[in-house]
Image (spheres, rainbow, N blue to C red):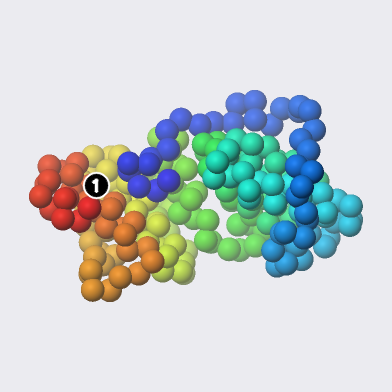
Amino acid sequence: GYGDDERPVGGGVAGSRRAGPAVEPPDDVDPRELAPEVRSQLRTLSKVAADRVARHLVAAGRLVDDDPKAALEQARAARALGARVAVVREAVGETAYAAGEWSEAIAELRTARRMTGDDSALPMIADAERALGRPERALRIAQSPEVQRLAPAEQAEMRIVEAGARRDLGQLDAALVTLQDFGLDRRAVRPWSARVWYAYADVLLAAGREDEARDWF
């Protein structure tokens, strides 16, 4: 959801936190499907609560690609039982992002970040700010000192978000420079290279430089 062709539009959390019928995880979900390092974070809960939270998280993971709204309901159900567990708040934030609930995504990912000190969700938070029509906030996040500590793949995502925010503000030349500065060397292909190249091509196209855009696409 970071590239401009896939820029999220809309969203919001109106009514998303209202009480409703309890959400059940699917019967075929086994809590043991949850990664051991994630399950270990649930040890502060009772065994019954931990197993149920694990089942909700597994269900959310299964659903997020095909039905993000349903995945979010499962993640919220996990939060109702395990709100003090960072991985639960992170799961709600990520599924809220996938479901287009940008404000909820920002709130949950920031909460998880405060609990863990992990900055890896900063690109997602910044992109959600863009989706809410706040590119200036996205730029502030992108230019914060914490970004320099991100892993290379996450820095690439942040550059894509930053370029998108520049484009939102009509700053096409600055958007191109943002991506150029990260490195566009085709001889040094990384797992994230195609995403950076695609974002660069998309900005070139917006700038009317069609031949160059076609080359990078």
Measuring from the top left, give residue 140's x and y in whole percent: 40, 51
Q: Nearer the viewer, residue 114 or 161?
A: 161
The amino acid sitting under disc 1 is Asp
Q: Is residue 17 left or right of residue 109?
A: right
Residue 67 quadrant? top right
Residue drawn at (23%, 69%), measured in percent from left and top?
186
Judge whether residue 83 can be spotted in this image.
Answer: no
Image coordinates for residue 197, horizontal then vertical, percent = 27, 57
Is disc 1 surrounded by few (<14), some (14 to 19) or many (20+) residues within 10 Å?
many
The spot of residue 161 in percent (x, y) is: 37, 50
- Give the mark count: 1
Seen in the image, is 203 located left or right of residue 134?
left
| Residue at screen point 52% across, 56% down | 121
- Classify 152 as above or below 135: below
Side of 30 where 179 appears, left or right: left
Give the residue drawn at x 31%, y 59%: 194
108 or 206, nearer to the observer: 206
**Residue on which disc 1 sits:** 202
Relative to 135, say whether 148 is above or below: below
Front-lying residue, 51 or 86: 51
As helix, strand or loop, the secondary structure at mark 1 comes to helix
Residue 172 visible, this angle: yes
Q: Is residue 201 left or right of residue 15?
A: left
**Can you give x and y, in whole percent of width and height, for residue 63 in the image?**
62, 44
- The residue sitting at the front extreme is 28
**Which of 32/94 is in front?**
32
What residue is at 50 percent from the left and 31 percent from the top? Answer: 11
